[in-house]
Amino acid sequence: MLKKILIPLLVIAPLTVSTSANAEIEAALANICEIVKTDDKGELRKKMKNVHSNYQLQLRDYYSGISCGGNSLIKLAILNNSVEAGTLLVKKMPKKLLAEPENDGKTLQAWISEQGLSENAVAKELLDRI
């Protein structure tokens, strides 16, 4: 009888913990798109540090899971000419991940040339880093 109660609880408990942890992380990252859009480098740095200290996550761990109106954080920075925040994002991301295709299947480099944004300061920083 006891086994019938404990086994389902042991299976369900980790699922509940991970779901609530994801919700907490989502809440911690809730306004990151707005921070990038307004080019608030200090606030972005604090947000990233907070997520790292509370959840042990680096930017590369959650970057692909964030979509700002269909754009990634770096694309959003380029489109809004958010030089300070965009440069910070480019510097914090590993070079290897900057060269990989994003959720839309295009690399950042291909997207920049397709959009004609190669003169943007963030785009230049990105292309120099790749």
Image (spheres, rainbow, N blue to C red):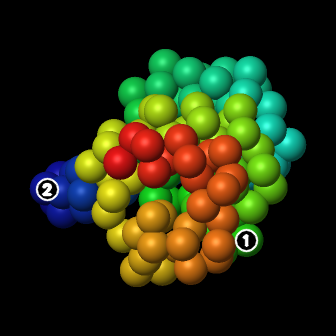
Residue visible at 18% across and 62% down in the picture: 4
For marks 2 and 1 on the same chain, the one whose residue lies earlier in the sequence: 2
Within 10 Å of disc 2 (Cα), the crowding (few <14, some 14-19, many 20+) is few
Measured as percent of width and height from the top left, residue 62 is found at 46, 49
Quadrant in which the N terminus is drawn: bottom left
Q: Could you say which quadrant of the image residue 35 lies in?
A: top right
Within 10 Å of disc 1 (Cα), the crowding (few <14, some 14-19, many 20+) is few
Pointer 1 residue: 69
Q: Is residue 33 above or below residue 57?
A: below
Instruction: Give the structural element (helix, strand or loop) at label 1.
Output: loop
Determine if residue 26 is in view.
no
Mark whose residue sits in front, 2 or 1: 1
Marker count (numbered): 2
Measured as percent of width and height from the top left, residue 18 is found at 40, 49
3D distance between C-alphas at marks 2 and 1:
48 Å
Task: Kindly identify the amino acid type of the residue bearing the numbered disc 1.
Answer: Gly
In this rendered view, identify the residue nearer to me: 77 or 68. Answer: 77
Measured as percent of width and height from the top left, residue 68 is found at 69, 63
Q: Is residue 122 above or below residue 117?
A: above
Instruction: Give the structural element (helix, strand or loop) at label 2.
Output: helix
